[in-house]
Image: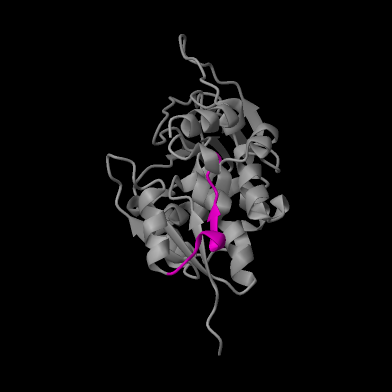
Amino acid sequence: MSKKERLGIIQSRGLGDLVIALPIAHHYYQQGYDVYWPICEPFWSSMRSAAPWVNWVPIPVDPQGNFFAVEPIKRLRNFGITEENTLWLYQYLNSDPERTDPDLYAMMKFDQYKYAVAEVPFKNKWLLKNCIVRNTIREQDLYNQLVTNPRYWVIHQRASDCNYDIDTSNIDPDCQIIELTELTDNIWDWLLILEHCEGMILIDSVFANIVDQMDLNPEADRYFMRKWNRHVDGNPVFLNEWTYLSVETPPGFRFIPVDPAEEIRKKLGNK
C-alpha cells in the first residue's frame, strides 16, 4: 500500500475556529490525505476524542504567542509536511499579515475565508455531524448528572473572552435552567443535553457553532447573542433558524479595523 500524502493545517485556536474548520480537514481526509493539525493543548482532549482520524498535535500555550504559528509550522516541518501541503486558515495574524489574501479578507466573513483559501465548498461547513464520533456514554453520564426536569433550557454566558449575565426571567419557571460550564473537559459531552432541551440561549461560541453546523435540536427555541467585543466580520455565518438578541456594546469600546494590504506594506517596508 502506498504511503498517504500528508497535509498540515495552521489554525491552533480557538475551539470555535477548530470546529468551524473541521469539515475542511475532513474534506481532505476523504481525498486520501493524512491530516496533521497542531492545536493548543487545552483543546486537544476535546478534538482528539471527536475526530480521531486527525493527527492532532498538542502545542503548549506560551506567553510569547509562538503557539499561533511559529511552533505549529515547526512541528509540521518535523513531520515532513511542506509549505505547499500546508493550509493556512487564519483570516489574519498580526505577526504574519503577508499570509492574508487582502481581496478575500475584504469580501468575506472569517469562516467563509477559511473555506475559500482551502478551496473547499463553504456548504461543507454544515457537514460537521459527518466529521465527528460521538461518545454516547459520556454524553449520557453528563445528562444524568445535570438534568432533573424533562423540561429544561440551556444557557451559555461565560466564554474565554466575554461574559454575560443572561436574563432568564421570561423562561417558564417550571423549566430547569442548565448552564454550559467547564464541568467537563470535553465540549462534545454536552451534545445530548443540547439535543433535548426546550430552548437555548447561547453567546457566540463553540457551542453556538456546533448547534448551527449540526442543526442540533431544530425544534428548540434557539437564541443567539453576539460578542460585543467582536468586529462585525468576526461573527460566523449561521444557516439555521435562530432568534438574534440585541447586545449593547459597553461605552467607550471602539473597534480597530485592520487593512491587511497596508499591514503587508508596513512589514515589507521594515525589512
- Residue at (44, 32) in percent of width and height: 157
The outermost residue toward the left is 63
Where's residue 226, x and y in %?
Answer: 56, 29
Q: Residue at (41%, 28%) from the top-left corner?
A: 163
Residue at screen point 55% across, 20% down: 247
Give residue 149's position: percent from left, percent from top. Answer: 47, 46
Residue in front for this viewpoint, 216 or 197: 216
> Above or below — where is 121 with respect to 62?
below
Q: Is residue 119 visible?
A: yes
Q: Look at the picture and state if 153 lies above or below 233.
A: below
State which quadrant residue 94 falls in.
top left
Q: How many marks?
A: 0
Q: How is the image coloured?
A: one colour
Please, which residue is most extreme toward the top here? 251
Is residue 89 within the magenta segment? yes
Q: Residue furthest bottom?
A: 1
Tell me: 166 left or right of 70.
right
Which region is colored magenta? 80-91
Res 4 → quadrant: bottom right
Q: Position of residue 127 (x, y in %)?
A: 66, 58
Picture quarter with the N terminus: bottom right
Tell me residue 128's x, y (percent). 61, 57
Between 5 and 151, the one nearer to me in the picture = 5
Residue 197 vs residue 22, the one in the foreground: 22
Q: Is residue 23 magenta?
A: no
Depth check, front residue: 214 or 71: 71
Observer able to see residue 172: no
In which quadrant will I find the C terminus?
top left
